[in-house]
Amino acid sequence: MSVRELDFDSCYRAVAARDARFDGRFYTAVTSTRIYCRPICPARTPASRNVRFYRHAASAEAAGFRPCRRCRPELSPGDPGWDHRGDLIGRALRLIDEGAADDAGVAGLAGRLHVTERHLRRLFTAELGTGPLAVARTKRLLLAKQLLTETGLPITDVAFASGFGSVRQFNATMKETYGFTPGDLRAAAGRAAGAGDALTLRLHVREPYDAGALMRFLAGRAVPGLERVSGPGASVASGREGDAGPGGADGWSYTRAVPGGVITLTPLPGHVRLDARLGDTRHLARVVARCRRLLDLDADPGAIASALGETALGPLVEARPGLRVPGAWDGFEVAVRAVVGQQISVAGARTILGRIAARAGRPAVPGVEGGFPEADAPEVHRLFPTAGELLEADLDGLGLTGRRTATLRALAERVAGGEIDLDGAQEPGEAVSELLRVPGIGPWTAGYVALRALRDPDAWPEGDLGLRRAMACLGIPDDHVERWRPWRAYAALHLWSSE
């Protein structure tokens, strides 16, 4: 939906009803106050003559509106319309979320997408009413606003953590855009600075959200040294790659080694708590974006249930509302997982992947093999190797067949060389086509990578034995797969979870 396609009457009705289904889909700007809000803002509904609707927070800010301090637009879940789009704008927005524009500017962003700066700006203006630089700036400001409000991180650290190049630039931009300084906001929030405070943020989610099923999925595939899942049944790791069993959200947590430290994700009512212990917070925006992608926090469960609920999957959808597709922290990592997991059990794949991480991966904290000594999970301390690191590693004696080793090297060579981009820049269909050109990668492997790493909601791991078995048990003919478009990835999770 472009900025021109927002229907005023539909948006106004959603605002009047404070309908949570529309949270993150658009923003309400009030001309009399120059404030923009989420559709669920508890403030009195403004008169329609004073209202403007914007598709993106950056569009509202570019028009001169400031974020509401009451409903806090920085807490909105992401718009599933952008999250599920594989077109250039959708991919560009995901790269901006990860800080690509902060790192390399609009020119670098356009380069990753293989388009000109001019073309990218033109598309952004048509779709969002503002350019990519304004979107990146709004992302920085909203993350900074959340950090100032929810944490005791010193203002200097907040500036760099949210992507600003200097404290002076941070202060000036916030004053110019919002009308108050970082210190003003910190004082209003009643937060005292504390360099020793743990960095904890709330990642809001569009409900319903079946956190237990997703955590159980991750638990069965937790790679030793890289990640750990705690919770009911977390030690269970049986079946084949792709299986998922029942679970509850209570007591679950996911801990992972990331560059420079360790993060822990804990599902709670209405949000997921992110606890980050980082030696350098400058890439916090990337950490937040990857956490949201890993846990599929921006999906639209209502639209998915509406489409799949009218098919033979109806009873499964009703039994498991809010089931999500586990995403990826790193696209290359998921591709390696898929190749290693071909025709072996999940437990066997975990063992081999742990050996790969131990041999080819780096310590999360440079020079400290066990990670932060005071961390709660010192056994989680190694990073998964990059494509370049895997190319240089000796993979003999890890339990891989010669054929699997050759496939991994061919995959790593193409990813390191830029022929395949599994982290959001490449159009999903093109990425899948390139994956299928790698010797040893077939439709199942490419489909699984598309499902988890490329975030394609219509991905389908063709030939998966677990899916075939589940469909046979439920009496669902093969031709019903086409009826589940464009949500076949979620259909796959419902089938895996039914076993």
Image (spheres, rainbow, N blue to C red):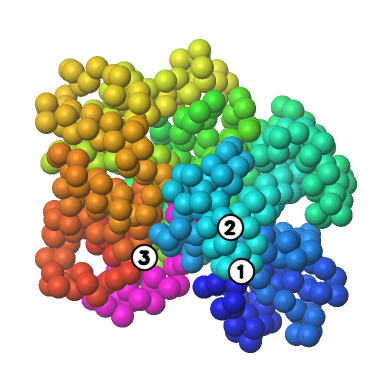
Q: Which residues are magenta?
A: 293-317
Q: Which tag, 3 or 2, sits closer to the chain's start?
A: 2
**Residue 401 lies in quadrant:** top left
* In the image, residue 495 lies in the stretch drawn in magenta: no
Judge depth for marks 1 and 2 and give the one in front: 2
Label 1–label 2 contact, CB within 8 A = no
Left or right: where 207 falls relative to 282 = left
Secondary structure mostly seen in the magenta stretch? helix
Which of the two residues, 488 or 201, is positioned nearer the viewer here?
488
| Residue 121: mark in rendering | 2
In the picture as drawn, the residue positioned furthest to the top comes out as 367
Q: Residue at x 54, y 27 (%)?
A: 261
Judge depth for marks 3 and 1 and give the one in front: 1
Amino acid type, residue under disc 1 in the picture: Arg
**Residue 315 lies in quadrant:** bottom left
- Pointer 1: what residue? 55
Left or right: where 398 falls relative to 159 = left
Element under label 3? Answer: loop
Question: Quick one: label 1, few (<14), some, or many (20+) residues within 10 Å?
Answer: many
- Pointer 3: what residue? 320
**3D distance between C-alphas at marks 3 and 2:** 41 Å
Judge depth for marks 3 and 2 and give the one in front: 2
Question: Quick one: label 3, few (<14), some, or many (20+) residues within 10 Å?
Answer: some
Question: Quick one: label 2, few (<14), some, or many (20+) residues within 10 Å?
Answer: some
* In the image, residue 310 lies in the stretch drawn in magenta: yes
**3D distance between C-alphas at marks 1 and 2:** 16 Å
Which of the two residues, 198 or 249, is positioned nearer the viewer here?
198
